Image: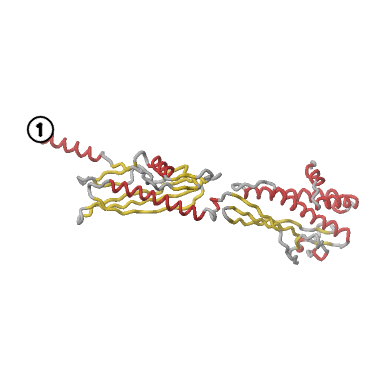
Amino acid sequence: MRTLLAFCFCAILLAFEVSAQKVVLNLSPVENQILVTDYRFIEVLDHRIRKSDIGEVYERAGYKLPVTVQGGMVPSASRFFSESILPIDSAEKEIQVRILELELIERLNPETGLYEGDVQLGLGFYVIGSFDPVHLLDYAGSIQYQRSGFRMDRVETVLNKLFSNSLVYFDSWIKSQALNTRALAKTFRLDIIEQDKISTGEKVFYDPDRPLVWSDFKARPSPGSRNNATIFTSFSLEGISLMDSGSVVQTLELNVYMLPMQSWVRTPNDYGLNHEQRHFDIVRIVADRLIYRLENAGLSLDFYQAQINEAYLDAYREMNRLQELYEKGVDHGLDPEGQETWNGWIDEALEGDWGRIEALLQSPR
């Protein structure tokens, strides 16, 4: 009885020691395959659900053992990617790698007596910028293998081959797509255009060679207004950004216009037409100032959209402020002397002398 108990104890101890073992694989760069790059790997994140091991393999006695990576998945993968490349001195792009999947499945083939395995790797590559990392592409690869019970090194070879394949895949992609992918752009260029457009009954575009005429005012006079005429003027900024040889090119089209169907007149006369024309001129001045600000704002690759939006809103507020100052300065067109003074200021501003306009905008309300 005592002998039987001792035997059972030894069997339990032996089983515990075997189950506590594990297979540790070393992840290391492939010799003589260092890639020269214009990017750097700066971070590896492990997004796998199960992070403790990557699967199980059989050892010679037929037991299944868990498989882990030497030194931990993140440190080992970080070292692999960093030591597999040689960044050039001007390399500025910083790459983040996310491990999405790494799974090893192995089974015994009873007919051949060999162990058959399948290793699957899924990675996501992101570029680091001023905001959240931007996704570039994913890699999904797998390798099947066969091994005998004495060739555990075969599993390690497959693991390293998969990571090497992912690096070659990413490197080939980034070198072929760098000039066409916005997230990889190195420089920024702004192009502001104003195309010659034909005015219609729906919209009259500003043209110094085509001043307003009363036939441009097509709406019915507002019965509740004491004004002799009203004009609806504004400006628009429409843009599209494209890639050109590694640069983001932001094209902005500026339009200054009035809307005939929202503009009206009761009693047409030359004095009143000049007054309304000056409202239109003010919008042109604001548009000119907006162009100047944008061209001299030092727009950055990371923030250009926000900078353009801010400049546009500032210009819109400036337009409303100048229109208010103008109406007040000419008493809504009833003060001929004030009108003559403003005519001179507006003409100066149209020629690019904004000194008086600046002083007016800075005056207290």
Q: Position of residue 303 (x, y in %)?
A: 61, 47
Query: Percent from the top left, x then y, of residue 359?
Result: 80, 43
Drawn side of residue 344 relative to residue 82, left or right: right
Specify whether residue 316 is in view: no
Give the percent coordinates (x, y) of residue 114.
Answer: 22, 52
Residue sitting at the far top: 2
Is residue 340 shown to the viewer in this render? Answer: yes
The correct choice, above or below, for 208 with respect to 330 in the image is: below
Q: Residue at x 29, y 48 (%)?
A: 154
Kindly indicate the quadrant of the structure image that contains residue 360: top right
On the rendered structure, is 319 left or right of 146?
right
Q: Look at the picture and state if 214 lies above or below 136.
A: below
- Amino acid identity at mark 1: Arg
Q: Which residue is mark 1?
A: 2
Q: Nearer the viewer, residue 41 or 321?
A: 41
How many numbered badges does the structure rendering display? 1
Q: How is the image coloured?
A: secondary structure
Q: Is residue 349 left or right of residue 118?
A: right
Q: Residue at x 74, y 48 (%)?
A: 318
**Looking at the picture, how far across and down is residue 36, in whole percent?**
46, 47
Q: Tell me: 154 left or right of 124.
A: left
Q: Residue reaching furthest front?
A: 32
Q: Secondary structure at mark 1?
A: helix
Where the C terminus falls, by quadrant? top right
Residue sitting at x 36%, y 43%? 27
Where residue 3 sits, quadrant-wise, is top left
Quadrant occupied by the N terminus = top left
